[in-house]
Amino acid sequence: MVKDFIFCSKILSLDKLSNIESNSLVFLFQNNKILALNNESEQKIPSFFFETKSSKWKFKILPILQKIDQSNWNGIEFGKYKSKPTYLLYFTNNSINSLQNEKNLQNELSFLQEYPLRSLIRLDPGYNLLIAGIAYHVYTWISNHIYCGRCGKRFIYSLAEFALKCPSCNNTEYPHISPAVIIAIIKDNKILLAHNKQFPTNLYSLIAGFVDPGENLEEAISREVKEEIGISICNISYFASQPWPFPNSLMLAFTADWAEGEISVDKKEIMDAQWFGLDNLPKLPSSISVARNLIDHFVQQFSS
Ligand SMILES: [Zn+2]
């Protein structure tokens, strides 16, 4: 969990924007994206959390959000950061864009823009992005579970735990967390790095994949490695874990040694994979990721 952050023990609904406590953090979402301040003209990174003690929140953002009909937004208190509440607000029916299209508000709202949360990773590896990740995880889960999947009635918030409850059939829905494994494979002081077709150009990272039903973590690792690059591994050992909210993974990182086989990429997910030494490392993932921590760990080991 993020330092100084505590997750709520149940979903706390926010009925009115004026109930938001001062000195809290607020994250805004719409259309599966986070709303951030566009500060490009000032050559700053977009700011995607709103401190309610700031005058910008009090005098600019809150009065505008209060124009949005109650049926077009939802608010939840999902945790506490340094003892202050953290909220997420999400807007439906493009209500932020609708306001932005109103003539007299165009200038007022031009600073607020939608960003894919993932696009902000490289900009801010700090705590606020990690809390934004938790907010995004909760937002995607809750906005994808309006109705009970069993009987179709509208879910309500459970009064007992952080869950959704069906008032008709009693079905309970908890936040989804999908375990995924990520693996650093070593051979002759070189590390195996691969280029996935979804990565930015020339970026290489570790082999990773989701755990299938019925698999333990070691089996998932061996299967993914075999499927994606055709080699066998041994000496699998645990390294660290990290929540990865795109949208709901828990990354479990391991190390292993090459055992046998030549690299043969599947060309479906993995387009290229190579053994990289310290002197020819390619473009690597962001330092916020456990993948990068694991790669850096080996760089340190090789260089000592
Ligand atoms: Zn139901």
Image: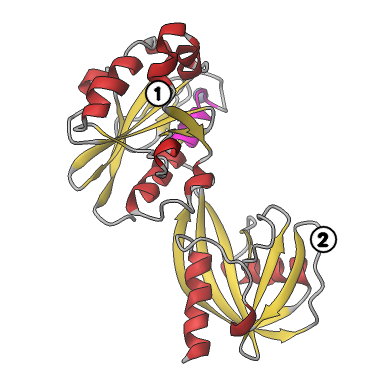
Residue at 33% x, 29% y is 76
Residue at 18% x, 36% y is 23
Left/right of residue 266 with respect to residue 26 in the rendered view: right
Q: Give the amino acid at mark 2.
A: Lys
To which residue does mark 2 refer?
A: 267
Q: Residues within 10 Å of mark 2 (few under 14, many from 20)?
A: few
| Occupied quadrant, residue 207 | bottom right
Q: Nearer the viewer, mark 1 or mark 2?
A: 2
Q: Residues within 10 Å of mark 1 (few under 14, many from 20)?
A: some
Q: Is residue 129 above or below residue 208?
A: above
Q: Earlier in the sequence, mark 1 or mark 2?
A: 1
Residue 196, percent from left and from top: 70, 59
| Magenta span | 139-148
To which residue does mark 1 refer?
A: 156
Q: Is residue 134 above or below residue 204?
A: above
User: Under 8 Å from ligand 1: the CB of mark 1?
Assistant: no
In what element is the residue under mark 2? loop
